Amino acid sequence: MQLSEPCAIAVGAGALAGIGGATSRRCAAGGLHTYVVGRTAAKIDAVVADIRTRGDQATALATDVTQPDAVEALFDRITGDGRTPELVIHNVGNNMPSRTLHTTAEVFERVWRQVFFAGFLVGQEAVRRMLPQGRGTVIFTGASASLRGKPFFAAFASGKAALRAFAQAMAREVGPRGIHVAHVVIDGVVDGDMVNGFGYGLGRLLRLSKGRGGTLLPDDVAETYWQVHAQPRDAWTQELDLRPFREKF
């Protein structure tokens, strides 16, 4: 019987210069055929093109991971390619501010679906595919809001806190069965396309105000994710937080 080939799945890849793009590149550089997953075809195509210019292997799959059927179809497609996920990174989220009393139920549910529900769907399906082989890593990207709520970010914080609790519960359930589940708190500004393009230049001003060494570099974050994946079974990390050395905590 032919064994399936291990692969990586980077969900929520988004911009080329961001955590999603950087983790996609790092997974591919580590020798795993990487599926770059996001809602916008043009963005994930750019990530895949960049990976291929480096001599590594990747495939772009445009998917809305807030939909159960779409997530199941995504993993079925990958299995149909003769591959089994060895590493799945979930990096979906939307932290647009909104006043609590002005947040409609529709907006709150949309944020909840992006920030938490998509992570539940992806994590559940990833573990389902990994269990038969008795190994694999699932990493969820968290934020400062995973630990504390702040004004104007009630919806985002609610979703991120839920995702953190889900990651802890899943880790305790499937860790003894060989599946490594980790949660990474990104506690600082990431120097990527998202912040630099935010608010007609306001995001770029925020980044510049942090000064040299005041922001997280996506490639450094990606390297840490890969280190978590490479950890031996007798020394697993369930949660870690990342911030620039100048960031207060």
Image: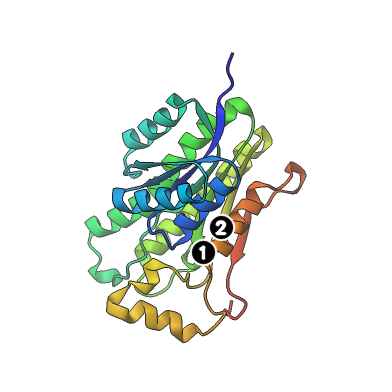
Q: Residue at x 43, y 24 (%)?
A: 80
Q: Amino acid at mark 1?
A: Pro
Left or right: 106 in relation to 93: left
Using the image, determine if residue 146 lies above or below residue 214. Answer: above
Q: Secondary structure at mark 2?
A: helix
Q: How is the image coloured?
A: rainbow
- In this figure, which residue is indicated by the disc labeled 2? 222
Can the viewer see residue 91 in this picture? yes
Seen at 47% across and 50% down, the residue is: 53
Q: Mark on residue 218?
A: 1
At x 59%, y 54%, the residue is 225
**In the displayed structure, would residue 173 be above or below residue 157?**
above
- In this rendering, the count of numbered labels is 2
Check the picture and name the quadrant holding the N terminus. top right
Residue farthest toward the right in the current orientation of the protein? 234
Residue 97 x, y percent position in the rendering: 32, 70
Q: Is residue 235 left or right of 22 when viewed as pictured?
A: right
Indicate the quadrant where residue 74 lies. Answer: top left
